[in-house]
Each structure stands twice: as C-alpha cells, then as structure tokens.
Amino acid sequence: MSYAPKQWLAVNVANTAVNSAEVDLGRTFDKLQVDLPTIDASSINIGVSRTSGGTYKFLKNEALVDFTTGGMQHVFNIWGYQYLKLICNNAQTANRTFYVRPIAE
C-alpha cells in the first residue's frame, strides 16, 4: 500500500490477527493521523522500519495508546519513517479497517 497526497489510506487488521500489512507512505513523515474503527479492547502501537520488508520496531512510549474499544482518532509521532504497521496488543475477532493519513509539517 502506498500513499497518495491528501488521501486516507485503508489499513486492514484481519480477523485473529494483531498486525496490519506493511504501509508505505511514499516518503517520510513526522506525524500520522489514525482513524480507529470500533475494535476489540486493545492498545495500538505503530511498528516502523527504515526499509520495505525490513524488521519492524515499536516506536518508544508515545505510540502505545490504550484505545479500549476504538471509535476515535489519534495523531501519532512517527519521527521520519516511511514504512509502518499498525499493531494491536489483542487479536481482533473480526476484520478491522483503520484509516491513516500522514501529516506534513
């Protein structure tokens, strides 16, 4: 998945999964707006990588946000990364579609 300017990008977390597929924002950004659907109780983190298909690491502290059952928006600091995954700390019991949009400063 790659990003086209000023568009929301759909990011899916499949039934029984905790991770989304890799998201390519097309270039580096400092912030990411995430529109969360209603989800099974979970915290959300952003995994980032310097390269496509690389090793994903959690962003430190700020990215882990307890969203309980979702249905809200949040802006994450992603500190200059292009490749990311959404990671839930609990497997979802249905397919979930999140929407993300990078924010240029």
Image (tube, grey):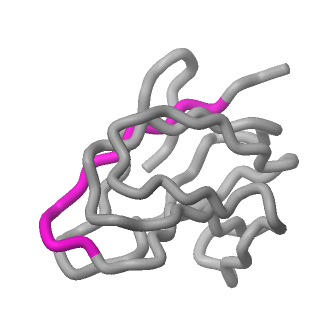
Give the side of residue 3 with respect to residue 60, left or right: left
Q: Residue 39's quadrant in the figure?
A: bottom left
Check the picture and name the quadrant holding the C terminus. Answer: top right
In the rendered image, residue 78, in percent from the top left (x then y), is placed at: 77, 49
Note whether 93 is above or below 80 in the view shown: below
Magenta-span inclusion, residue 44: no
Magenta-span inclusion, residue 98: yes
Note whether 97 is above or below 54 in the view shown: above
In the rendered image, residue 76, in percent from the top left (x then y), is placed at: 70, 43
Residue closest to the far top: 6
In the rendered image, residue 56, in percent from the top left (x then y), is placed at: 67, 78
Residue depicted at 61% across the width and 43% down the height: 25
Note whether 15 is above or below 13 in the view shown: below
Q: Which residues are magenta?
A: 92-102
Give the side of residue 41 with respect to residue 57, left or right: left
Give the side of residue 102 with respect to residue 16, left or right: right
Give the side of residue 87 with respect to residue 10, left or right: right
Q: Residue 48's quadrant in the figure?
A: bottom right
